[in-house]
Image (tube, rainbow, N blue to C red):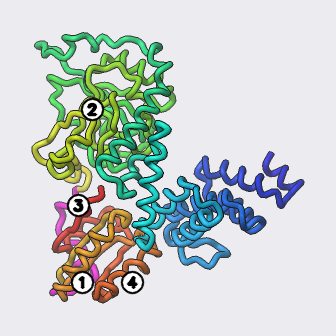
């Protein structure tokens, strides 16, 4: 229909925008880019067209980080995205969704010029949303907006409230779970505790959660626990998912099920403890947790903060991710693990860490006397205060090099400029593309000190 409409009227901007939005909704970002780009050229003052183009370029940076917008004077999609989103705000200053996208885009290239101003506006946007009983920001992105622990709780609390209201009419249709009985959790000789792990992304290998938890499922005490896997997305045929499925006692393919059907299956499986390994992250289906009739619900590994939900009982955390003074800003009871809650399966999944050989220090691009600091985090996690601290150390240690991953071409410019402003030669910053899996850890071991960031 859109194609026919444009054949009849090739300069119909609203049709181009509508088709661009349709492409965007099905991950067709190159097609969306063409439609939105044509729309802004036909009507340069159209905020919706610029917004769509900015978002398309944000996603294309992830899909093709070495590429750039064709026919535009930008070196990267990131730079194009920032330009487009700023254009929207110049046309329509009150577009808070656009502002939130702009903040994300600026953070990804470490463009901190408007940071203080934008964070102030983001706080105001949250207050305005709360007055209407709404959340403002997707909780995972809210970590980037400079919100305090109290503001993060308020934001997630209202999102959870919206979810509760959404599923309220469906709740009565979820069948009873025999595990809800008061004595369900009492230990009985020969009876195993039924624990289900639910994952919105279907335990795909594209998620850090599945890669890290790959071997964990095999470490349950099978004499006392019956472990069920509940993937909410289709099988990606990955070894991570296959390994997890192989050691689970039960497995329910739930990708095609509605939220109510998933909740009914949880009752049918007589689940006593439901563990949500997604939280407010990729492919979340939090409605299934809100609908489920189980004695205990737990948030584990997927989302590193409070869900702010009455339907989540416990949150697994550790002394590194949780500070006692912040306890008031968690709605869940906290289950503090002795070491780290963020488990990994590297000994199982990444056997190359035990290998010898690999690239030499010189082949990795360093001299024998270099002191190599390394941060392989996504660049949006590098905040100005953290960067200033690193630069202060670099200035005092002349043989130090800072080794980072090149997630964005545009970020080089901002970080090199900032290094010079701190009195550090930009040549001491080393950016590398992501390494091949088979040699990644063999190369990274040439770092002398790994630097982490407070932002997860």
Viewer-proximal residue, 428 or 135?
A: 135
Identify the residue position indicated by label 3 in the image.
352
Cα distance between the residues tagged 2 and 1: 45 Å
Is there CB contact under 8 Å for labels 1 and 4? no
Q: Residue 365 lies in magenta, yes or no?
A: yes
Cα distance between the residues tagged 4 and 2: 45 Å
State whether residue 11 is above or below residue 238: below
4 or 2: mark nearer the eye: 4
The residue carrying pointer 2 sits among few (fewer than 14), some (14 to 19) or many (20 or more) residues within 10 Å by Cα, namely many
Mark linked to residue 366: 1
Which residues are the magenta region?
Answer: 351-369
Viewer-proximal residue, 415 or 449?
A: 415
Q: Main secondary structure of the magenta part?
A: loop
Q: Earlier in the sequence, mark 2 or mark 3?
A: 2
Location of residue 150 in the rendering, given as x and y in whole percent from the top left corner = 30, 46
Mark linked to residue 417: 4
């Amino acid at each position: 229909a859109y194609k026919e409409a444009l054949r009849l009227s090739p300069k119909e901007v609203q049709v181009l925008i509508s088709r661009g939005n349709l492409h965007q909704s099905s991950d067709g970002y190159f097609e969306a880019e063409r439609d939105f780009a044509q729309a802004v050229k036909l009507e340069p003052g159209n905020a919706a067209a610029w917004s769509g183009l900015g978002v398309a370029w944000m996603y294309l940076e992830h899909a093709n980080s070495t590429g750039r917008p064709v026919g535009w004077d930008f070196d990267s999609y990131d730079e194009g995205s920032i330009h487009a989103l700023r254009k929207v705000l110049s046309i329509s200053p009150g577009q808070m969704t656009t502002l939130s996208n702009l903040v994300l885009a600026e953070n990804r290239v470490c463009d901190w010029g408007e940071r203080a101003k934008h964070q102030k506006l983001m706080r105001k946007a949250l207050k305005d949303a709360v007055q209407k009983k709404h959340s403002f920001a997707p909780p995972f992105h809210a970590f980037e907006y400079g919100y305090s622990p109290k503001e993060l709780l308020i934001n997630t609390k209202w999102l959870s409230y919206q979810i509760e209201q959404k599923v309220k009419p469906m709740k009565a249709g979820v069948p009873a779970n025999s595990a809800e009985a008061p004595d369900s959790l009492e230990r009985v000789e020969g009876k195993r505790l039924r624990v289900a792990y639910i994952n919105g992304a279907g335990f795909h290998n594209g998620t850090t959660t599945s890669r890290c938890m790959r071997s964990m499922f095999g470490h349950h005490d099978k004499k006392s626990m019956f472990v069920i896997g509940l993937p909410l997305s289709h099988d990606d045929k990955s070894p991570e998912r296959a390994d997890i499925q192989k050691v689970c006692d039960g497995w329910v393919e739930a990708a095609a099920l509605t939220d109510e059907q998933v909740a009914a299956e949880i009752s049918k499986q007589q689940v006593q403890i439901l563990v949500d390994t997604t939280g407010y992250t990729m492919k979340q289906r939090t409605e299934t947790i809100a609908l489920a009739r189980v004695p205990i619900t737990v948030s584990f590994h997927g989302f590193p903060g409070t869900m702010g939900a009455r339907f989540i009982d416990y949150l697994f955390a550790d002394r590194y991710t949780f500070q006692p003074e912040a306890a008031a800003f968690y709605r869940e009871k906290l289950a503090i693990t002795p070491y780290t809650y963020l488990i990994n399966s590297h000994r199982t999944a990444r056997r190359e860490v035990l290998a010898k050989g690999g690239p030499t220090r010189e082949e990795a691009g360093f001299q024998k006397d270099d002191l190599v600091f390394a941060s392989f985090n996504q660049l949006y996690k590098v905040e100005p205060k953290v960067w200033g601290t690193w630069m202060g150390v670099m200035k005092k240690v002349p043989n130090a090099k800072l080794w980072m991953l090149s997630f964005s071409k545009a970020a080089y410019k901002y970080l090199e400029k900032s290094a010079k402003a701190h009195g550090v030669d930009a040549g001491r910053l080393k950016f590398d593309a992501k390494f091949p899996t088979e040699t990644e850890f063999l190369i990274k071991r040439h770092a002398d000190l790994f630097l982490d960031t407070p932002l997860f």
